[in-house]
Image (tube, rainbow, N blue to C red):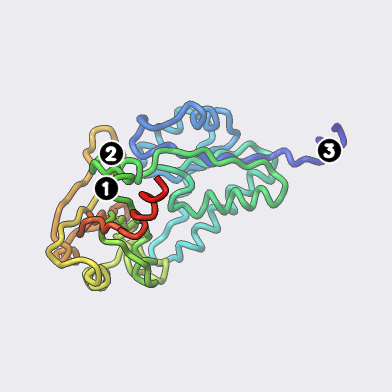
Amino acid sequence: MEVLDSIQPKGSLACVGIGMTLGSHLSRRAHAYIEQADVVFTLVSDGIVELWLQGMNEDVRSLQPYYQEGKSRMKTYRQMVNAIMAEVSAGRRVCGVFYGHPGVFAWVPHKAIRTARSKGYHAHMEPGISSEDCLYADLGIDPGARGCQHYEASQFMLYRRCIDPSAWLILWQVGVAGDKTLMRFSTGEAHRQVLVDVLARHYTLDHQVVIYRAATLPFQSPRRELLALGALPLAEFGMADTLAIPPARPLEADHEIRARLEALA
């Protein structure tokens, strides 16, 4: 065992989620990873959250400066991973802190963990309360009642998906819907009109939809804006906004399967 221990890399990585709302969603285990780390990298929703994290560890480094207008987000993400891995490779206990859940719509934590493990370092992901969890609570949705489909908005536009209008449809990152460059922080009315045209294959233009954004600070309220699908292009969207589309038709019974199950009973 001593020989094996001597060649085991000393650095480690934990990517933790702190939830959506400041101070409300942090688990004890995630808190311990932050406090015990040698270096903490943060990619969170607000500068106030960064200040809050600085009270838990003396070496907290923001990843936000890697973002730049006109710069490919993929290049930005790779630079973030490289910064994290430089400290892991130096033998330090590194904690990456991400808002929400570190595995949900978050390329950097997944890539950093895969890279660390491929080099023999211990790497762990600690879940957090995501925007999806807040959405269910804030909009009163039970995904078990009618079902729930989730897609990234641009991917939904670029590929033909089998949509079931009898279930909820949740589209994430609507603020950059239709962007193929990965260099924009928002797209405009024309891009959202294309999204509406895609959705119109399954829903009427007067179907009521919800623009949703989870609260990130305790004094904030979630955004829950109801509007007709056809009005979507003129709506205001940010990077954190999500589109929730309620079911547009009732569930359709499968009488053949019902008969088979009744026969078994």
Instruction: Look at label 3 and name its amino acid.
Output: Leu
Question: Where is mark 1, residue-wise?
Answer: 213
**Residue 83 has which mark?**
none
Packing grade of label 3 (10 A; few <14, some 14-19, many >=20) is few
Residue 157 in the image: x percent, y percent? 34, 70
Question: How far across and how far down the image is residue 190, in percent?
Answer: 23, 73
- Front one among 28 and 60: 28
Query: How many C-alpha atoms fall within 10 Å of the one at disc 2: few (<14), some, or many (≥20)?
Result: few
Q: Quadrant of the C terminus?
A: top left
Query: Residue 4: which disc?
Result: 3
* Amino acid at the residue labelled 1: Arg
In the figure, 176 relative to 258: above or below? below
Foreground mark, 2 or 1, reads 2
Residue drawn at x 34%, y 54% is 258
Q: Which mark is residue 137?
A: 2
In this rendering, the answer to whether 66 lies above or below 87 is below
- Name which of mark 3 and mark 2 comes first in the sequence: 3
Q: Secondary structure at mark 1?
A: strand
Q: Is residue 182 left or right of residue 169?
A: right
Cα separation between marks 3 and 2? 48 Å
Residue 53: % across, % down: 44, 33
Sequence-wise, the earlier of marks 2 and 1 is 2
Does 147 sit above or below residue 58? below
Q: Residue at x 30, y 60 (%)?
A: 174
Disc 2, SS: helix
